[in-house]
Image (tube, helix red, strand yellow):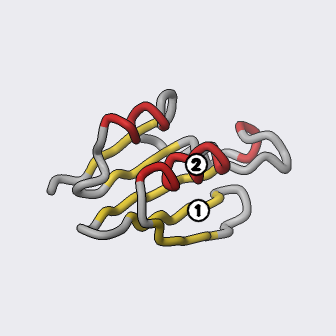
Amino acid sequence: PGMVLDPSAIAQREPCFLVAIARTKDAFGLCFLDTTTGTCRATTLSDEAAVVAELARHEPREALLGPGADSVRLHKALRGVALSSTPG
């Protein structure tokens, strides 16, 4: 995916989140980067339903999916979002 960095292409005060999602045996790690402000937020969640809720709350424009985070449910939650997956 291509990150939009041109200020004229991003509405003022509208966040433009990039999310990275990683999965271990017991948890999901999420990191949201707002490319308009440079704000970075990270969290660990124990189940996929909580991940889907966070995705709905932040409405990312791009997503990087790590190994194990490439599920059908996450793909549905990220419909319309530019996706990249890392090999795993």
Spot occupied by residue 20 in the image (x, y as percentages of width and height):
43, 58
Along the viewing direction, whichever of 4 and 17 lies nearer the viewer: 17
Q: Residue furthest top?
A: 80
Q: Residues within 10 Å of mark 2 (few under 14, many from 20)?
A: few
Q: Return the x and y of residue 36 as percentages of the image width and height.
A: 71, 56
Residue type, mark 2 in image: Ala
Residue 28: image quadrant is bottom left
What residue appears at the point 46 percent right and 42 percent down from the top-left corner?
A: 2
Instruction: Kindly identify the amino acid type of the residue bearing the numbered disc 1.
Output: Leu
Quadrant (top left/top right/bottom left/bottom right) for the N terminus: top left
Dots 2, 1 in contact, CB < 8 A: no
- Residue 32 locus on image (x, y percent): 56, 61
Q: Earlier in the sequence, mark 2 or mark 1?
A: 1
Q: Which residue occupies the foreground of this view, 7 or 49?
A: 49
Q: Which mark is residue 33?
A: 1
- Residue lying at the far left of the rendered structure: 88
**Which one is nearer the viewer's eye here, 24 or 39?**
24
Q: Nearer the viewer, mark 2 or mark 1?
A: 2
Q: Give the Cα separation between the discs numbered 2 and 1.
A: 17 Å
Identify the residue at horizontal 73%, vertical 63% (top origin): 37
For label 2, the residue is 53
Q: Residues within 10 Å of mark 1 (few under 14, many from 20)?
A: many
